[in-house]
Image (cartoon, grey):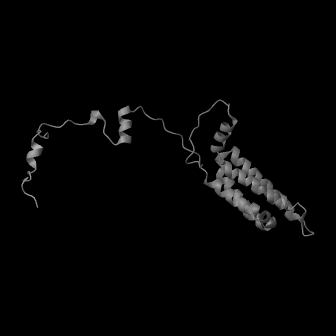
């Protein structure tokens, strides 16, 4: 479900159902963009400090690039949280997440072996694309006949004009208008 199809101002149920409260909270902010930004920060942060064993070969990167990866990963996690709790700065968070994901290519093992890079670019796009729903305008009191007329295609009874005497046709006039076919004539 996108923000375009979500209910604008969902009903508040008084805190009884936590799932509904979480759903309402999630729909009022760029939730998925923030979540992906936080997830993207994890591989960028983790891989330079992990001791990976590939077929007996240890891959380690504990140099100054490790410090850059630490900064990029922590910043991406912070940007994801900021987008959740301050939705008004979502454009800044989206641009910064995209730039950090691109910077992580040379700094952090090709952006966390590509995982952090791809997730970071998707998160930046989602954060920049999200927009809050506009509040629903109050509906005026409209007569019931007018509202049903919109759906049925008919006009309300009050607006139908009665026919003038000149426009009315007598009961037998319709028969006189069309010439009668001769019943004896057949082809």
Residue 69 in sight in this render: yes
Image coords of residue 13 (percent x, y): 63, 31
Image coords of residue 150 (percent x, y): 37, 41
* 180, above or below 111, in the image: above
Residue 158, image quadrant = top left
Which residue is painted at 9% across and 43% down in the image? 173
* Residue 116 in the figure: left or right of residue 47: left
Which residue is painted at 9% across and 48% down in the image? 177
* Residue 38 in the figure: left or right of residue 145: right
Which residue is painted at 76% across and 66% down in the image? 105
* 18, above or below 176, in the image: above
| Of 101 and 35, the residue lying toward us | 35
* Residue 7 in the figure: left or right of residue 120: left
Q: Quadrant of the C terminus?
A: bottom left
Image coords of residue 48 (percent x, y): 86, 62
Residue 62 in sight in this render: no
Image coords of residue 1 (percent x, y): 60, 49
Residue 8, image quadrant = top right
Residue 42, image quadrant = bottom right
């Amino acid at each position: 479900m996108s923000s375009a199809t979500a209910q604008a101002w969902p009903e508040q149920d008084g805190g009884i159902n936590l799932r509904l409260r979480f759903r309402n909270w999630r729909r009022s902010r760029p939730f998925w963009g923030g979540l992906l930004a936080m997830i993207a920060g994890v591989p960028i942060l983790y891989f330079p400090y992990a001791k990976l064993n590939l077929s007996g070969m240890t891959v380690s990167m504990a140099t100054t690039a490790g410090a850059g990866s630490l900064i990029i990963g922590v910043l991406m996690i912070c940007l994801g949280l900021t987008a959740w709790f301050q939705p008004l700065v979502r454009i800044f968070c989206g641009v910064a997440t995209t730039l950090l994901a691109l910077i992580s290519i040379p700094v952090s093992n090709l952006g966390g072996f590509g995982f952090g890079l791809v997730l970071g670019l998707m998160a930046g796009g989602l954060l920049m694309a999200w927009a809050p729903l506009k509040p629903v305008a109050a509906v005026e009191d409209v007569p019931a006949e007018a509202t049903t007329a919109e759906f049925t295609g008919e006009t309300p009874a009050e607006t139908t004009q009665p026919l003038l005497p000149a426009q009315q046709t007598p009961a037998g006039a319709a028969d006189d208008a069309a010439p009668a076919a001769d019943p004896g004539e057949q082809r």
